Image (spheres, rainbow, N blue to C red):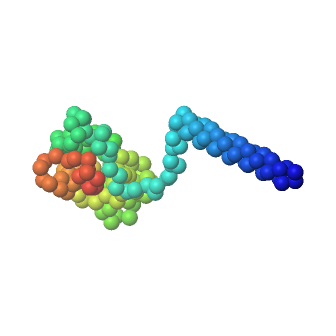
Amino acid sequence: MRGQMRGQMRGKMREEMRHARVALVLGVALLGGALSAQAQTQPPAKPAKSSPAKSMSVSPSFKAMDTDKSGHLTLDEVLAYATKKSSDAKPFRITDADLDGDGKLTVEEQRKAGITGLEQHGTVDLKAMDINGDGYISKEDLDEYFRRKHREAYARADADKDGALRPSEFALFRF
């Protein structure tokens, strides 16, 4: 009789263990399904915005310059962008801006003189900018300076020399 009771108890224990395992498997499956559904309904987390140090050689966006949306930049598109950028800078007298008289216009000197539109280029060589050498950076000087700088950057970036910049080449487009 004792042996019979032990056998029954073992049977019950096995049955309870089987039920516990089934419940555990079902619970894990339900939890997995719920997590999967939640992951599908929530938008992906956005990466934290980093605040990179302001570069002195800021490159414009490829999309901003690709006006015909062809997926490559022509020299004409780059020069049109240069004209647009030159209009951001206003004419100035060199002696009013070059505070230390070294022929270079630093970002700090630009700021102190109230000159905007050049700061992204860092320190600027005023001799290269004063096209006609009159000591005044005119609208014409600015236009020509920006065209030259953009043309030079374009030539350096056009690695395969096919006359068009692709996005991979555009990564090299710097002043």
69 or 126: which is nearer to us?
A: 69
Q: Residue at x 80, y 47 (%)?
A: 8
* Percent of width and height locating residue 145: 23, 50
Residue extending furthest right? 1
Q: Residue at x 43, y 58 (%)?
A: 108
34 or 175: which is nearer to us?
A: 34
170 or 18: which is nearer to us?
A: 18
Q: Residue at x 75, y 45 (%)?
A: 16
Asked if residue 147 can be seen in this view, the reply is no
Q: Residue 30's image quarter? A: top right
* Percent of width and height locating residue 157: 21, 54
Q: Residue at x 46, y 55 (%)?
A: 52
51 or 34: which is nearer to us?
A: 34
Name the quarter where the C terminus is drawn.
bottom left
Number of dots carrying numbers: 0
* Percent of width and height locating residue 6: 83, 53
Apparent side of residue 160 relative to residue 45 in the rendered image (left or right)? left
Apparent side of residue 57 relative to residue 169 in the rendered image (left or right)? right
